[in-house]
Amino acid sequence: MVMMKRIMVVFIMMAFLLPVKGQGYRIGVSFKGLSGDTLILGEYFTTRMIPKDTVVLDSRGSGVFEGPERFRGGLYLIYLNPNYYFDFLIDSLQVFSIATDTSDFVAKTVFQGSPDNDLFLEYKQLLRQSRTDAERYREEMENAKNKKDSLNAREELKKLDHKVEQFYTGLNAQHPGLFVTDFIFATREPAVPDSILSGTPAENDSLRYFYIKNHYFDNFDFTDVRLLHTPLYENKIKTYISRVVPQHPDSLKTAVDFLIEGSRSNGEIFRYMLITLFNHFAESKFMGMDAVYFHIAEKYYIPEATWSNPDFIRQLSQTLAENKPTLVGQTAPNLVMRRIPPEHFQMAVLDTAIKNDPHIGEDFLIHDIRTRFTILYFWEVDCGHCKRYTPALHEAYQRLKDKSVEVLSVHVINSIEGKQKWVDYINENQMFDWINCWSPYSNEYRKIYNLKSFPQLFIFDKNKKIIAKKITPEQAEEIINTFDRLDLN
């Protein structure tokens, strides 16, 4: 998995930005306060700005962006430098003009021939004025000398909120066909109705969460390719995946399927969605997220990412095959191990022949261990990290075993020398109370459990379903205590 993250290609988003055929575009600009400057017309692709055209202003600050191929709808910007730029919308009407003044792009900009931008400008002016007024009313509330002044300021804030809400309502009623309406509503988060909040604070928090989860995309159509060409899109999708959906592999798989399947109506959105979600889970540091990553790889990326390098697809397929049997949520692969009884270790102290004998013990299947939790721990005596993990796990086991927990402590070196060191270690540390086992005749378990480094620690539930892996002894104890406390197993 780590190797996959390191070799993962950086996908060039410019490949999305193919030209759109049509009548072309013509955008006249007039910038008071500029002369002879070069302006850049840029297109947003999510949060990135892609330069599309340039113009050199004449002595009066005027110029024309013009080209034979129409732009796709989205949010665009005119850029001079970090201090001088402003954004505007482009949709079906692509012949219009902009007159502005560098002293104030919001108050002193005028559009001609672009109803979308007339309303967009009105929206920006409303937001700016509302923020200014709201700050003033809040200051009045904080500095009020009496209750009446405080109530008056509070009432003005309510009127201000009502005014903004009226703007939204008017947009939806009067301009349902304009892109600006879809864009402005896409900026709005779902508002939880007060009518459903009638329980305790904890119950209301739960109601709020489920309402937002179920209505998260009410105002945001993630299949609208125009929104993909705005900074809103990526944040909306990543917030949904990272904060709205429960961070459990099964819930996330369902959410991923919803987003990817829903994006199939547009090839550009499908490609973006697949790449974005694939990379998001490839980079996740949280346990169990590899299950979501490989779900995307198997169901979508390997069969449908035709743009990807064939060598990358082949390596991804191989990595999937190696990791799939031991993903969180899978039933643990069964293994035959040889259990070494405590008396063998004790007798081996005085008898070299017993110490060297690889045939001692009884074979068993790990699925035959009947406990609420099974910890499968792969380690070896000379491993640096194992020297910390092994005693820490044994200490944790002393606190956990009364909760129907068993540890299968698998020593991975099956040579005579390895057995000698193992016997000495167990005797020196008195680790006789858990199941000491190994596989003296085969290393096949290394492939089955994809063991490329040690130590490795897995937790199984009572049905031998993997509930955690690649964790520390401290994390193992915490997870088991959590499951036990919540009675999840």
Image (tube, grey):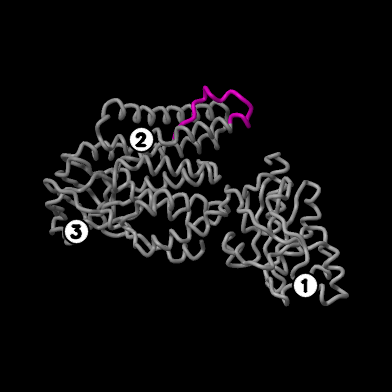
Question: Which residues are drawn in magenta?
Answer: 190-204
Q: Residues within 10 Å of mark 1 (few under 14, many from 20)?
A: few
Circle 2 SS class: helix
Tell me the quarter of the image containing the C terminus.
top right
**On the picture, is 447 further left or further right than 72?**
right
Labels in figure, total: 3
Q: How far separated are the C-alphas under marks 3 and 2?
A: 31 Å
Q: Amino acid at mark 1?
A: Asp
The residue carrying mark 1 is 357
Lateral position of residue 451 relative to residue 92, left or right: right
Q: Which quadrant would residue 346 be assigned to in this image?
A: bottom right
Q: Amino acid at mark 2?
A: Phe
Query: Horizontal and vertical percent for residue 367?
Result: 68, 50
Q: CA distance from mark 3 to mark 1?
A: 80 Å
Q: Which residue is mark 2?
A: 185
**At 20% across and 61% down in the image, what residue appears?**
38
Q: Which residue is mark 3?
A: 54
In primary-sequence order, the first of circles 3 and 2 is: 3
